[in-house]
Amino acid sequence: MLCMEQDYTILLFYKYVQIENPAEVRGWQMELCQKLGLKGRLIVAHEGINVTLEGTTENVQKYIEELEKDSRFLNIHFKKSKGTGDAFPKLSVKVRKEIVSLHLENDIDPNQITGKHLMPEELKQWYESGKEFYVIDMRNDYEFKVGCFKDSVLMPIQNFRDIPSALSYIEHLKDKTVLPVCTGGVRCEKASGLLVREGFKDVYQLYGGIVNYMEKFPAQEFKGTLYVFDKRITMDFDPEDRHEVIGRCDKCGSDTEMFANCRNKQCNKHILCCDDCRMDDGTVFCSQQCEELVLNKTL
């Protein structure tokens, strides 16, 4: 008997919606995902839900059907991509204070204040028409290094929660048209709302995030590959693999899209590192100091 290969799908979605009982929703989601053999990360909070899952294509569809039986989770933009079957090592379902960690003292409800949604087709028209606008990348610096929209602006941040303290970097754009972008859109719901609250006059956000744009217009205005938080690490949406490699090895500067974590566990810095700059066993150190600290302990 022939063994048919399983077809896997990775599902990415979020929704800002009032959840009175996040612990109860967590239990329901854990049970549902275990029943369907799904792995990945789910965050549930009073403000909503943020999910990345992988499973067989059939079971991912069953998950969506079960989720939508709850009226709180209707009208969600589900983003799907081809899975590998091992993108996530396990299932993690957690209750948190926020579904993305911005840590504002005066929090933002994206259902009350947020940027205007811009469809990928509209952004494409903006580029082609020569409209004046500024793409503000709201991702972590290491995500930006391997792929970004052309001429986009990255504030001097290492994490999303650094954005409030870095707004002075884009103060000169307050009267311009600005477009915050992020992977799937969830970070930009709050980030664009923050810009509106801080007095930026014409604030948009890319509907569905970078994922949505790259699916429709691969290897075009978005240069490089998209960083994703699973075993794939990066994604290229172009079936002909025509994308431009913009990543540079943090050690020698050569072209690469390969990431690694510093072997010094006290550091664990996530860096781009080519094959030539790795040790024979694949080990990577981000600096000579980290290398000496680890090697001196093992001698």
Image: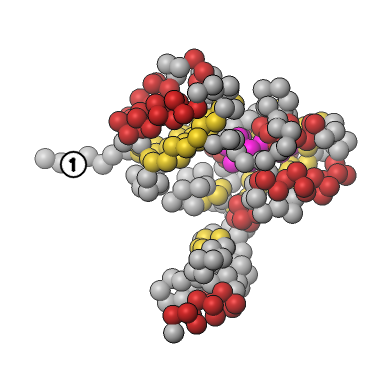
What residue is rendered at 40% in x and 47% in y? 87
Q: Residue furthest left?
A: 1
- In this rendering, position of residue 38 left or right of residue 117: left
What residue is rendered at 52% in x and 60% in y? 259
Q: Is residue 144 depicted above or below 63 in this figure?
A: below
The answer to whether any part of residue 14 appears in the image is: no
Q: Does the magenta stretch include residue 284?
A: no
How far from the left and from the top, in percent, is residue 239?
47, 45
- In this rendering, position of residue 29 left or right of residue 137: left
How far from the left and from the top, in percent, is residue 186?
60, 35
How far from the left and from the top, in percent, is residue 298?
44, 80
How far from the left and from the top, in percent, is residue 142?
61, 56
Residue identifier under label 1:
3
Q: Is residue 270 depicted above or below 90 in this figure?
A: below
The answer to whether any part of residue 297 appears in the image is: yes
What residue is rendered at 65% in x and 50% in y? 159
| Nearer to me, 87 or 242 | 87
| Snapshot colouring | secondary structure
What residue is rendered at 18% in x and 41% in y? 3
| Nearer to me, 297 or 67 | 297
Answer few, some or many: residues within 10 Å of disc 1's Cα (few below 14, many 20 plus, some between 14 and 19).
few
- The total number of labels drawn is 1
Q: Is mark 1 on a helix, strand or loop?
A: loop
In the rendered structure, which amino acid carries the disc numbered 1? Cys
* Residue stretch rendered in magenta on the structure: 179-188
